[in-house]
Image (spheres, helix red, strand yellow):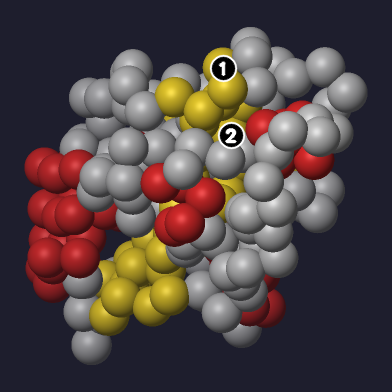
Amino acid sequence: MAELVFYCGTMDSGKSTLALQVDHNHRARGRRGVIFTSHDRAGEATLSSRLGLSADAVEVTDDLRFWHYVVDALTHGAPIDYLVCDEAQFYAPWQIDELAKIADELDLDVFCFGILTDFRTMLFDGSRRLVELADRVLTLQVEALCWCGARATHNARTENGEMVTEGDVIVVGDVEPESVPAVVGYEVLCRRHHRRRMTAARAHAGSLSPDVLPFT
């Protein structure tokens, strides 16, 4: 019986790498699948990993109907055994409903990958619906680390190096460290430092100040 599976984790936990690996493993066994993604760092219609791996994908727009896409492909003879859906946190709840319908009615495995909470520590709409519907919700075992070395549990958004907790939910930014912070950036933090808005940049600046108490 086909399943709807949700693999979740913070940024830097290897979600896209695992998505590519799952696709590779199934293709190696003769199965045929379709990869979907949304707002990937490499650009439209691409599933990419920070390790340098990538694959062509179908871009999930606000109006993409998974059910119509898959039924139309099957009707025209395209072989489909499974779907790999990356960045699923950005999907609309009704799109997640359609993925569940595909697993139930068409007997196709659906593997979703995404982040649970946004930079405000609130569940993404797509992730919430996946938690409600998925046959299995699996937390990735590769732990991302906060700048302090503790397990990172929260995603933080920065603007000019300062953490922010308000703004649009979806803003694509730079997630790679640079000498000059990007206008919009992201990093992962432990809960303690997310609550304190203590980013790596602020921690480094504080360590240079003789007036800061030695607490982190």
Residue 77 drawn at (x, y percent)? 37, 53
Residue 174 in percent (x, y) is at 67, 26
The image shows residue 16 at horizontal and vertical percentages of 60, 55
Residue that appears at 51% across and 74% down: 140
Q: Residue at x 47, y 56 (%)?
A: 192
Which-is-in-front pick, marks 2 and 1? 1
* Residue in view at x 24 percent, y 48 percent: 123
Residue sticking out furthest to the right: 179
**Residue type, label 1:** Glu
State the count of labels: 2
Of residues 183 and 54, the one drawn nearer to the viewer in this rendering: 183
Which residue appears farthest toward the bottom when viewing the image?
1
Q: Secondary structure at mark 2?
A: strand
Q: What residue is shown at x 32% (from left), y 21% (from top)?
A: 166
Q: Residues within 10 Å of mark 2 (few under 14, many from 20)?
A: many
Residue identifier under label 1: 159
Q: Is residue 116 left or right of residue 162?
A: left
The quadrant where residue 62 appears = top left
Q: Would residue 87 be found to the left or right of residue 128 on screen?
A: right
Where's the N terminus, which quadrant?
Answer: bottom left
> Could you classify mark 1 by the number of other residues whose Cα lies within 10 Å: few (under 14), some (14-19), or many (20 or more)?
some
Mark 2: amino acid: Tyr
Numbered mark located on residue 186 in the image: 2
